[in-house]
Structure formats: C-alpha cells, structure tokens
Image (cartoon, grey):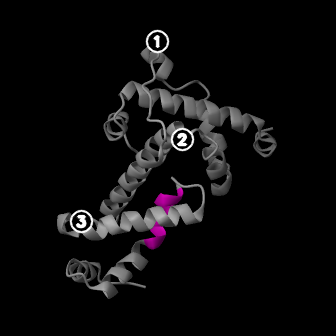
Amino acid sequence: MSINLEAVIQQCRKNNRRAQFELYQHCFDRLMLTCNRYKKNREDALALLNAGFLKVLTNLDKYDDRQSFMPWASTIMVRTAIDDFRKNKAQKLQMVYCETEEELEGSASEDFFHDVVSAMSAEEIKKIIFELPDNERLVFTLHEMEGYKHHEIAAELGVTERSTKRYLKSAKKMLQDELGKNQHIQSMFS
C-alpha cells in the first residue's frame, strides 16, 4: 500500500487519529525489525515499538521534512530501546578497564566470525545474541547492527569508549565460543 507520506505526516501533526494509524501501519514492519534486535520476544518488541512510536508522534514537530522519515523514526526507536534498557537494568553499566588498547582490537578469527554469521539463519543469530549478558548484547547490537561508533555508544550509555570496546570484544568472544559449540555450525564449515 502506497501512501502520501508527507500528507499523512501533516495530518498526524494535527492529531488526526486515522493518519496516525496509517503512519503506524506504514512504519510497522521496519520499526518492528529494529525492536526485535533489542527484545527477546514479540510481545516485548511490540511494547517497545508502541512506546517508540508514541515518541515519534509527539516529536513530529521536530521532524525536518527535507530528510528521510524512516531513518529519523528508526533513530527514535533505537533511543527508545536504550532508554528502556537503562530503565529496566537493575545494575548500571560498569566501566571496564583493560591493560592496553590492543586488547580491545579484533582478533585474527574475525573473518571466521563473519563467515559463520553469514551462513546462519536470522532466528539462529537472534537466539545466540540473546544469550549474551545485557550489557554485551546492547553494545554489540548498537555497534554491529545499528552502525553506531564507539564514541556514540559511550555517550548514549554514559560510559567510556574503552568500556564499549571491551563489551564488544567480550560479546564477540562469547558469540565465537557459542558458535564453536554449535554442531549445526560446525557441520557447515567441516
């Protein structure tokens, strides 16, 4: 279904409920993909989507019509996921210290990691990612899936860049260890 997005957004700014529902339907699939990266089950992802979409609607006056709408809405959704993480996290992200900067850089097996991940189904990847501890999962998702830079993640989470690098390295190590245990994955590369 094709809609006149500009007209729908203008009607949403006037609090037209029908237009708001039309915009919700238009954005649903793409924003739900974003939410699924942060929540284990559909119900929690849907709750996150609804909270984020409410923020989209209440901030439409800040939306610049010269930019593309979906990336703008997706950014709000990611920030909503980060806010939700902060709100629901019993213990705050802790600063993690490493001896040297080299410890935080990728390992020689990085290519293997990418080869394995590209051979897996989305459900297999999601299952393994959600086995990560919350801090590692959030940093991994923001960096690897959303494309955030370490300084951006650090600013959003209120930690140092060094900590985000450490969480990412830890997440990749845990994922690599988990992938090494997976018989299905081992058979693909034997």
- Measuring from the top left, give residue 13's x and y in whole percent: 21, 77
- The residue range painted magenta reads 28-36
54 or 66: nearer the eye? 54
Which residue is depicted at the point 47% across and 48% down? 88
- Pointer 1 with pointer 3, Cβ within 8 A: no
Instruction: Give SS at disc 2.
Output: helix
Q: Which residue is mark 2?
A: 134
Query: From where the camera sits, is residue 129 visible?
Result: yes
86 or 81: nearer the eye? 86
Which residue is depicted at the point 23% across and 63% down? 67
- Measuring from the top left, give residue 59's x and y in whole percent: 24, 65
In the rendered structure, does residue 100 fall within the stretch colored magenta? Answer: no
Residue 82: give its label. none
How far apart are the two marked residues, 3 and 2, measured between alpha carbons?
28 Å
- Local packing at callout 3 (Cα closer than 10 Å; few below 14, some 14-19, many 20+) is few
Q: Earlier in the sequence, mark 1 or mark 3?
A: 3
Which residue is depicted at the point 38% across and 59% down? 77
Residue 181, quarter of picture: top right
How far apart are the two marked residues, 1 and 3, measured between alpha carbons?
43 Å
Q: Is residue 20 above or below residue 30?
A: below
In the picture, the quarter occupied by the N terminus is bottom left
Q: Which residue is mark 1?
A: 99
How far apart are the two marked residues, 2 and 1, measured between alpha carbons?
23 Å
Q: Which residue is mark 3?
A: 59
Instruction: Give SS at disc 3.
Output: loop
Amino acid type of the residue tagged 2 in the rendering: Asp
